[in-house]
Image: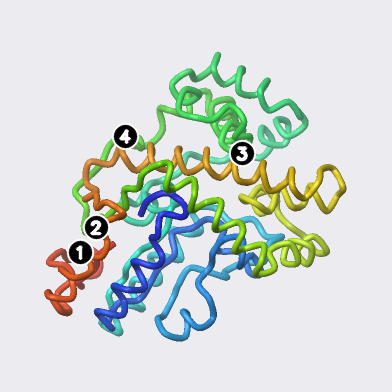
Amino acid sequence: MGPTASGKSALAMELARIDHSIELLSVDSMQVYRGMDIGTAKPTISEQQEVRHHLIDMVQPGDSFTFVEYQKEYKKLLIELKSRQAKPLLVGGTGLYLRAAIDGLTPPPQFPEVMAQLETEIDTELLHRRLVELDPVAAAKMDSKNRRRIARALEVTLGSGKPFSSFGPGLDKYKEASYELIGIEIDRSLLDLRIVERYEMQMDMGFLNEVQRLSEGEMSVTARQALGYKELLAYLRKETSLEEALAIAIQRTKRFARRQQRWFRRDPRIQWIDFSDVGSFLDQHRNRGNDLSSERIESGGFDASI
């Protein structure tokens, strides 16, 4: 795990090449959408042919998909992997999906009528100020521009009559992990450079054409908010220039990467390796051969590592 563009997928592929019993499980809330390939840095066809990948391409861009549905698919997948004596290696940067998988988080209830009312308010900052009044603990942990999270917190707070932050064991509480947790630590200036370079590469690969094709069909609210997609959709609507769209996408991605780093830094279970030490980390695993983890999944009873 780690921030976007930190090299998680490349490291995961190398580990799978060392241990052929490994299969990769995506922990990415946008790779679940079919057709959203280049902008989400989804594994290529050749990579998928070389190593089995799971939890990608599960729904159409127009469909809704939640971390609860991800959790259900993850649990079913574990049974299948156990039957084949395969090792699941989770890789990705969506922190909530990771916690849903390895910690079994239970979501608060839904209140559709409340959410429908909230959606009539177009001012996201106004919604955030309302959340500050009703649940300052939850509001303090959210970006004031993250409409989806703010609306969800308000939905639960208003619908249940209890603060959103009071539900569940809390994201700040961590139980003993049944996985080995590995995080990639990377200098921010280097990460920023890698983010810019990745956008340049994605544009050369046809990212704009991908967004154009997707815009001709249905896209859910979540899919339309994906990094890079939102800005290129604005360009296609002639609301901005291509240069401006890319600049905004890059800045938004950098901010997102900072939030990812803060999220994962709170988890005391993670073993951090520096980006510059990834080669040494791989050498250690090559020397260990197929014994990549001494941990056992409690529910499945087979070796696994992240």
- Mark 1 to mark 4: distance in Å? 31 Å
- In this picture, is 82 found above or below 1? below
Amino acid residing under circle 4: Asp
Disc 4 crowd rating (10 Å Cα; few below 14, some 14-19, many 20+) is few
Amino acid residing under circle 3: Arg
- Mark 2 to mark 1: distance in Å? 5 Å
Secondary structure, mark 4, is loop
Looking at marks 2 and 3 on the same chain, the residue that comes earlier in the sequence is marked by 3
**Mark in the foreground, 1 or 4:** 1
Looking at marks 4 and 3 on the same chain, the residue that comes earlier in the sequence is marked by 3
Q: Are marks 2 and 1 in contact (CB under 8 Å)?
A: yes
Which residue bears the numbered disc 1? 280
Amino acid residing under circle 1: Ser
Secondary structure, mark 2, is helix
Which residue bears the numbered disc 3? 148
Which residue bears the numbered disc 2? 277
Disc 3 crowd rating (10 Å Cα; few below 14, some 14-19, many 20+) is few
Q: Tell me which corner region of the image, top left, top right, bottom left or bottom right, holds residue 240.
A: top right
**Mark in the foreground, 2 or 4:** 2
Query: Where the N terminus falls, by quadrant?
Result: bottom left
Residue 215 in the image: state x and y as whole percent: 79, 60
* In the image: residue 59, left or right of residue 118: left
Residue 245 in the image: state x and y as whole percent: 73, 46
**Mark in the foreground, 3 or 1:** 1
Q: Identify which residue is drawn at 27% across, 61% down.
A: 278
Q: Identify which residue is drawn at 32% across, 73% down.
A: 14
